[in-house]
Image (tube, rainbow, N blue to C red):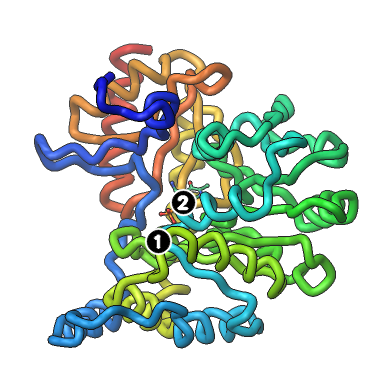
Amino acid sequence: MSKYWSRIAQSMEPYIPGEQPKDKKYIKLNTNENPYPPSPKVLESLRAAADPSLRLYPDPTCDELRTQIGRFYSLRKENVFLGNGSDEVLAFCFLAFFNPEKPILFPDVTYSFYPVYAQLFKINYESVPLDDHFSLPVERFLTKNGGVIFPNPNAPTGKYLSLDHVKTILVHNPDSVVIIDEAYIDFGGASAVSLMRDFPNLLVVQTFSKSRSLAGLRIGFALGHEDLIAGLDRVKNSFNSYTLDRLALIGAREAIKDEAYFHETRNKIIQTREKVSAHLRKLGFQVVPSQANFIFATHAQVKANALFQHLRDRGVLVRYFNKPRIDNYLRITIGTDAEMAAFLQKAAEIISFLG
Ligand code: PMP
């Protein structure tokens, strides 16, 4: 640890993202990126946007994009907040809505950024264990708390919580903000946005990184009551008065407009997921039913860590979490059909060799 670091920097326990190795070309199934390129219309508009206007600051309030996202969900721009990836939006949410006194609730197992933010912002939290089938124990989220956050579908399990259950959590938490992180909602689940009208304490967070194939542009957003969005603006403007850069604004605008491409690519991913899940079961894996663009699976005979290493040696990267309860599982992002065929073939070879 450097002697120049502040006490705050020393006390941080940062999140470690999935690896992006540069030593050779991998079949990359470890960070839930979309295997398909962004819409051709997005790429065309970005090429055209690389012009002298880049010397100018972007629109600080992103009115056009917020209006467009709002229209997509039948909302107004006052219900839309934008950030540099949903990770940034989530950080602002923690600061805007979670008070340090009462513990906030999130599940265990879940997205590992939540405890990182809670520690960074000195917010008390209670992580609520998932049940034996990795389902969210709804009844444990109805107790007094300082806020609630969970992904739906959950990460890294891919398990989806029905809107009826989400509604129960909202009904019993009128005094807390309930944040639903819908990074993976477009791969089969129904969004909680439809509940917004009835619940002014509901905030839905989504991203362009997954179903819209724009992880490289870093665009996330939150949808909620005007009052919640105003809270987020207040926090954001205390950090940085500009939200998205000019290219991200243009790329996102074209991505949201190209609905045909969006549907085509996410449907392909869903079909591939179902085929791969069935194939993995035949290879002896137990597969958690997924509504996301990844699969969470464990093998009865072969340890996940060994499988991870052997796949890596053969040029296939998946995600292994060295954490209690899930240390015998792998999270496998859905790639193209060709990538998944190569993955399945290598997994079968490794299993017959180690199993
Ligand atoms: N939420 C969840 C549950 C995620 O898995 C991720 C991706 N790691 C994010 C949010 C953040 O995505 P991004 O910052 O790319 O929008």
Which quarter of the rendering shows the N terminus? top left
| Rendered image: mark on residue 151 | none
Residue toward you, 202 or 321? 202
Q: Is residue 269 visible?
A: no
Q: Residue at x 72, y 45 (%)?
A: 148
Q: Residue 110: x, y in percent?
A: 58, 36
Residues at circles 2 and 1 in contact by the CB criterion of under 8 Å = yes
Element type at mark 2: helix
Tell me what residue is drawn at x 44 percent, y 44 percent. 276
* Residue 349 visible (yes or no): yes
The amino acid marked with disc number 2 is Asp
Tell me if 56 is positioned left or right of 305 in this view: left
350 or 308: nearer the eye?
A: 308
Q: Is mark 1 within 8 Å of ligand 1?
A: yes
- Label 1: few (<14), some or many (≥20) within 10 Å? some
Residue 225 in which image quadrant: bottom right
Please state the horizontal and vertical placement of residue 199, each as a whole percent of the image.
81, 66
Q: Is residue 116 left or right of residue 131?
A: left
Q: Relative to residue 40, is residue 224 depicted above or below?
A: above
Q: Pointer 1: what residue?
A: 84
Q: Residues within 10 Å of mark 2 (few under 14, many from 20)?
A: many
For marks 2 and 1, give the CA distance. Answer: 7 Å
Disc 2 residue lies near ligand 1 with CB under 8 A = yes
Residue visible at 74% across and 34% down?
103
Give the residue at mark 2: 87
Residue drawn 56% across the image and 68% down it: 233
Q: Secondary structure at mark 1?
A: loop
Amino acid of disc 1 = Asn
